[in-house]
Amino acid sequence: MYHDLERTYRGRFAPSPTGPLHFGSLVAAVGSYLEAQVHHGEWLVRIEDVDITRCRPAYEHAILRTLDCHGFRFDARVMRQSGRTATYQKALNRLFHDATVFGCACTRKEIGDSTLGADGAPVYPGTCRAGLPPDREARAWRIRVGEAVIAFDDGVQGRVEQNLATEAGDFVLLRADGLFAYQLAVVVDDAEQEITHVVRGADLLDSTPRQIFLQQGLGVPTPQYVHLPVAVNAAGEKLSKQTMAAPLDDEKPVPALWRALDFLGQSPPAALEQASLHEFWEWATIHWSLAKVPKTRTIAI
Ligand code: GLU
């Protein structure tokens, strides 16, 4: 039998259980699932509840049920970030060892006036980079980004380049409230689950250079990235619980799946909206083409 020397395709969907799934999250789920299907790969679901202050177990159950009702097939062994603190600590220790991590005493207010970075958050001005000011204690732990310029080729958005110092700054790995930051958790988890392809919303495009930087620091492989357009409302805001995005209807999955496929530029036939779940996925898998996905970060719906 022929054995491919390349690693098998392994994708994932990594929702945060801060609310039920809505149309915006369905788009990312559909895109990452179909990419995995057409590559005959695996598709894992990971519950990103690292920020336990914002997550609720009831939402996790609702999300998994909604995925199931919408016909996604995935391994029942779902990884949960909330149980992985010791692993994140090990990764942090490793970065410490390489002397790139430093304690930071600054409050949010103290850095609030700094210039804004690519994701709209203030770029850390470097106050504690060379040591804590006298009589101050470390609240959070940051990684020094130095002069790093990170570039990668995104499967939809094309070439992306970011100067970490000016567009992100030294970023937090362990937060002042003692929780590990998303950027560290996601990198450690993608590496441990041997994810080869990350297909997700373009709202995370500006985070990807920080994640690649951490992968380099930890000596783990960088997956291929594909950032799908994100659904926004008329005000340009990403659909979320905060913007009152309606939860998906577990009883009527096909119309929402159809809309997600249409949103992703696949031009599904109108009749498919009335099809069974099985027929929907059959058509979607046969016709899925990443090349047809609009090469834009946001689409207003
Ligand atoms: N947990 C993140 C979210 O729900 C997604 C992270 C990722 O896909 O890397 O927005």
Image (spheres, rainbow, N blue to C red):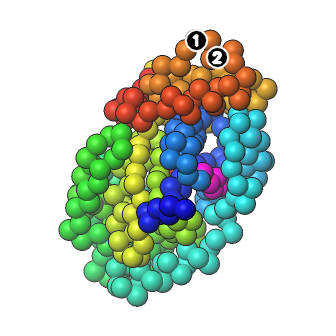
Residue drawn 74% across and 40% down?
68
In the rendered image, residue 137, in percent from the top left (x then y), is placed at 45, 80
Is the C-beta separation of discs 1 and 2 under 8 Å?
Answer: yes
> What segment is highlighted magenta in the picture?
43-47
Extreme residue in the top direction: 270
Q: Quadrant of residue 215?
A: bottom left
Residue pointed to by mark 1: 270
Disc number placed over residue 273 in the picture, else none: 2
Residue 230 shows in the view: yes
Q: Residues within 10 Å of mark 2 (few under 14, many from 20)?
A: some
Q: Quadrant of residue 177?
A: bottom right
Please determine whether, in this image, residue 89 is positioned above or below residue 2.
below
Between 72 and 63, the one lying in front of the other is 72
What kind of element bears circle 2?
A: helix
In the rendered image, residue 145, in percent from the top left (x then y), is placed at 29, 69
Residue drawn 67% across and 62% down?
80
Extreme residue in the front direction: 1
Q: Is residue 279 left or right of residue 238?
A: right
Residue drawn 47% across and 25% down?
266
Between 8 and 291, the one lying in front of the other is 8
Residue drawn 69% across and 18% down?
275
| The N terminus - image quarter | bottom right
In the rendered image, residue 276, in percent from the top left (x then y), is placed at 73, 23
Magenta span contains residue 46: yes
Per the model, the C-alpha gap separating discs 1 and 2 is 6 Å
Residue 242 shows in the view: no
